[in-house]
Amino acid sequence: MSNPYHGVPDHQLWRRAVSRVEPHRIDPVVAPGFRITPEMNLATAGSCFAQHISRRISELGFRYFVPEDGAGLTPQERAARQFGVFSARFGNLYTVQQLGQLFDEAVEGRGLAEPPWQRPDGRYVDPYRPQVEPAGYDSPEAVAAARRDHLAAVREMFLGADVFVFTLGLTEAWRVRADDSVLPLAPGVVAGSFDPERHAFHNFSAAETGAALGDVLTRLRAVNPTVRVLLTVSPVPLIATYEPRHVLTSTCYSKAVLRVAAQEACDRFDFVDYFPSFEIITASATGGLYYEADQREVNRLGVAHAMRCFVAAYTEGGAAERPPGLPAPSDAERRLDASAAAIVCDEEAIAEGMDAAQPSGTPGQGEGGNRIGGRLAALRARFRRGASRR
């Protein structure tokens, strides 16, 4: 009898592609849709994990495209004010809808309804990027002026990028009722105040996410006809869910929706490709080895594995080192490297506020919680030492 699976490549078979491969050698990238060459402008946006790609690209000497780079500031100021974390200072764009509305503003001139938020210290922040300016602004007018400058840089990014990397992170969001614009954080987490008459929680469906992603990709390609787009899904679980269910269940829903949306975009557009960072980090074969003790943050081993696969697949010749013939890093590149010393995640502000309010002795916090956390950390450290020796 004829069996259609006879003769399929090894990467299509679990035993040959996963079970019989050392975990740190698993590479799910099969046929990359394009290569990144040193002369290309590569821009990044999205959730926290996108920062690893931009950092690695910059280290290798490829052209990390940052129209808003904070020239003239000290390295300390750049780091504090998030210059170079992404291609512009928009903070984390966790949802596809955030990316779409940023395109609306920067390229099509749309305004957003939410006014500046005031902090407890009396300073003001931009509600659509509330943590990029630690000192805040002295007036709503100053917030508006800074946003105009920011949007000019964002427009340059959209129009000038040769490769645009977008990491999808969440489906849960807080919206402004007046215009359905999406906020990166709920009002009241770092500034402002939640008002149920003005703000609403929304968890985007698979249909909504897919439609929004297809729409923004279509419009981006219309204004930048040669741009290539690389989609990834963040492997970082939700730090909190507003749905009345377990955070694990909400995480599974969110990542499933985002992964489907990314695949549908790849199937629909020939200029879009998908890099499986999510699969590399979360694969059952790694046994949780690629997460820190909190079982959420991706550790250096996981980042290294994902970036090895990325470099081999998407850089010209699979370069593992700085391409020969390129000049040493410029002052601008060094400024960006220094400013991106730590991964920036707006979502962390949710946990920081909750931890400050949680009394000691509650599960996961008191003596018992610390004992369990310590044992898990020790066990994971043993596994990491073994993986490092390999």
Image (tube, rainbow, N blue to C red):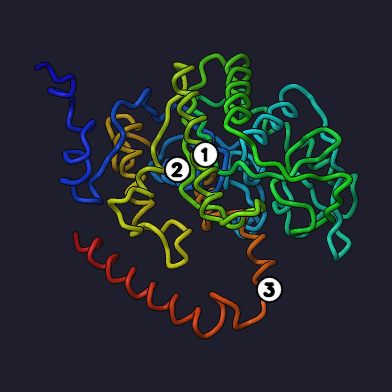
Who is closer to the viewer here, 370 or 230? 370
According to the image, label 1 marks what residue? 167
Nearer-N-terminus badge (1/2):
2
Between circles 1 and 3, the one closer to the viewer is 3
Q: Residue at x 61, y 34 (%)?
A: 205
**Local SS, label 3:** helix
Residue type, label 1: Thr
Residues at marks 1 and 3, CA–CA distance in whole angstroms: 30 Å
Image marks 3 and 2: residues in contact by CB distance under 8 Å: no
Alpha-carbon neighbours of circle 1 within 10 Å: few (<14), some, or many (≥20)?
many
Provide residue 181's location: percent of width, then percent of height.
76, 36
Image marks 1 and 2: residues in contact by CB distance under 8 Å: yes
Who is closer to the viewer here, 264 or 310? 264
According to the image, label 3 marks what residue? 356
Residues at marks 1 and 2, CA–CA distance in whole angstroms: 10 Å
Provide residue 49's location: percent of width, then percent of height.
49, 47
If the image is split into quadrants, where does the N terminus sit? top left
Alpha-carbon neighbours of circle 2 within 10 Å: few (<14), some, or many (≥20)?
many
Provide residue 125's location: percent of width, then percent of height.
80, 52
Using the rendered image of the protein, determine whether residue 333 is visible from the camera's viewpoint. Answer: no
According to the image, label 2 marks what residue? 53
Extreme bottom residue here?
367
Nearer-N-terminus badge (3/2):
2
Q: Is residue 189 above or below residue 28?
A: below
Residue type, label 2: Ile
Alpha-carbon neighbours of circle 3 within 10 Å: few (<14), some, or many (≥20)?
few
Q: Residue at x 43, y 77 (%)?
A: 372
Using the rendered image of the protein, determine whether residue 370 is visible from the camera's viewpoint. Answer: yes
Q: Is residue 3 above or below residue 359?
A: above
Relative to 268, 320 lies left or right: left
Q: Residue at x 23, y 46 (%)?
A: 25
